[in-house]
Every structure is written in C-alpha cells, then in structure tokens.
Image (cartoon, rainbow, N blue to C red):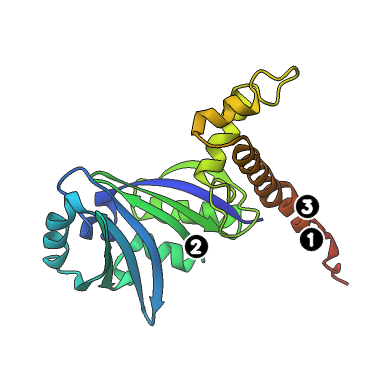
Amino acid sequence: MAVIAHLRVPADSFELGRILELEADGTIELENMIPMGEKAVPFFSVSEDVRESFERNVENHPSVDRIVEVTRHDSERLYSLDWNVSRDVFFQGIIDLQGQLLSGTGTVDTWEFEIRFLTHERLGEFQDHCSNAHIPLEVGRIYNPVRPGTGMWYGVTGPQREALMCAVQGGYYSIPREMSTRELADEYGISDTAVTERLRRAIETLTENTLVAVQEERDEEFEQPLDS
C-alpha cells in the first residue's frame, strides 16, 4: 500500500536547497517538478520580502543554467528553474524510487516535504539512500494517502477543517450538545446554513478519502486472481 511521508531536511544538505538559499526570513513553496528529458524543471513561488536576495543568489549559482519569472501575483512570484536534477542526490533518489513530490516548503534553515511512495519498503529504501549520501533526514508523520492528490488533510479544505475541529472540540457532537449551530456559525461570521454545509462537506470528503477509499483498495486486492 502506498504511503505519504512528511520529511524535514536541512537546506544546506542537498543541491536544490543550496541553490534556493535565503538570506532572510521568508518562504519558498515548491509548486511542481516537470520532467523535461534528463532534467526536472522545478516551479516555485517566492515571497516578496526575500525576492531580491533570492534572485541574486540563484542567478549566480554555478549549477543554474537559467531562472525565469513565470507570473507574479500580489506579494508572490512564480519562477521556473533550468537545472539538472542528476546533480542533486536527494531529488535523484526520489525519482529513482518512483516517489511523487506532493509539496515542499523551504525557509532559511530547513525544507519540509510531503512525498508519496508506492510502498513502505520504498520509503525505507529512500531513507537508506539519504543515509548513505550523508543527508540528515527527519521523518515525521507517515500515513496512507488513500486517494492520490488528497494530501495530509485527506482533501478537507482549511475552512472545513477548522469548522469540523471547532465543532468536535466545542462539543457540537456531544450528547447532550454543548455548542449550538448558531454558536458555531458565529465563530466564523457565517450563517447557520453555511456552517452546516461546511461540516457536511468536510465529513463527506473525509469519509470518501479515508474509510471508503481504504475499503475500495482492499476490495481491489481481494479481486486480484491468485497465482496458479
């Protein structure tokens, strides 16, 4: 069964982390990595407060062929990087073990990633790969992705997640009920109907992407023909 692992890596321990060096507080969001022949072109967004030093450091890095500003929106800019992934042992390991990069966030000192592996064994192989390459790797939460693309919150949006957690923690589902629908709605400045619909969508999405998805995966396993 596939797993998703939340990993933390020092920024100076892998090639792309050194390329995308930050000199001040700020963040870099790795949006995607698109395969281009032997290369993997990363797309990432950078906050405005670190943009100038970031551009200067990246453009002057010997491993970078080209950096391109793709779009800009409010206080963030989206860039693509012309860079050879084979120079980066960390990312090459992800590719070789058929890992799928779901998210990546970098700060001055640390990068945090969510990576999907086909099996627990593949994740273990990636840990060994990093250990052999002397890349310090801190493994946080490990969970089954159930449905691809749902991420660590199983497809539940931020507002849905906050409302559901508030409802559970506030006693909305307790017997007797300790929080009314109106009180829950007032927490977010929305109507009774809106908060009820938000909870409904959250519960439906969470159930579909956990219980239902696991059952479907188990059913598929049992439907596989036995080797003769």
Of callouts 1 and 2, the N-terminal one: 2
Measure how far apart labels 2 and 3 are at the Cα level.
23 Å
Query: Where residue 17 sits in the image (x, y, percent)?
Result: 27, 55
Q: Which residue is the site of mark 1? A: 221
Q: In this orientation, which residue lies closer to the viewer: 47 or 16?
A: 47
Q: Is label 2 in a helix, a strand or a loop?
A: strand
Between residues 114 and 191, which one lies in front from this camera angle? Answer: 191
In the displayed orientation, state which residue is furthest to the bottom.
37
Three-letter amino acid code at disc 3?
Gln
**Which residue position is annotated with label 2?**
100
The amino acid type of the residue labelled 2 equals Gln
Give percent across and percent down for residue 5.
Answer: 51, 49
* Mark nearer the N terminus (1 vs 3): 3
What secondary structure is found at the residue carrying circle 3?
A: helix
What amino acid type should be assigned to the residue bearing mark 1? Glu
**Where, by quadrant of the figure, is residue 63 drawn?**
bottom left
Query: How many residues crowd mark 2 within 10 Å: few (<14), some (14–19), many (20+)?
Result: some
The residue nearer to you, when weighing 11 against 197, is 197
Q: What label sits on residue 215 in the rendered view?
A: 3
Residue that appears at 56% across and 42% down? 160
Mark 1 vs mark 3, CA separation in Å = 10 Å
Rounded to the nearest whole Å, what is the CA distance between mark 1 and mark 2? 22 Å
Q: Residues within 10 Å of mark 1 (few under 14, many from 20)?
A: few
Q: Nearer the viewer, mark 2 or mark 3?
A: 3
Residue 62 quadrant = bottom left
Return the x and y of residue 18 as percentages of the image width and height: 22, 56
Whether residue 226 sits left or right of residue 62 in the image: it is right
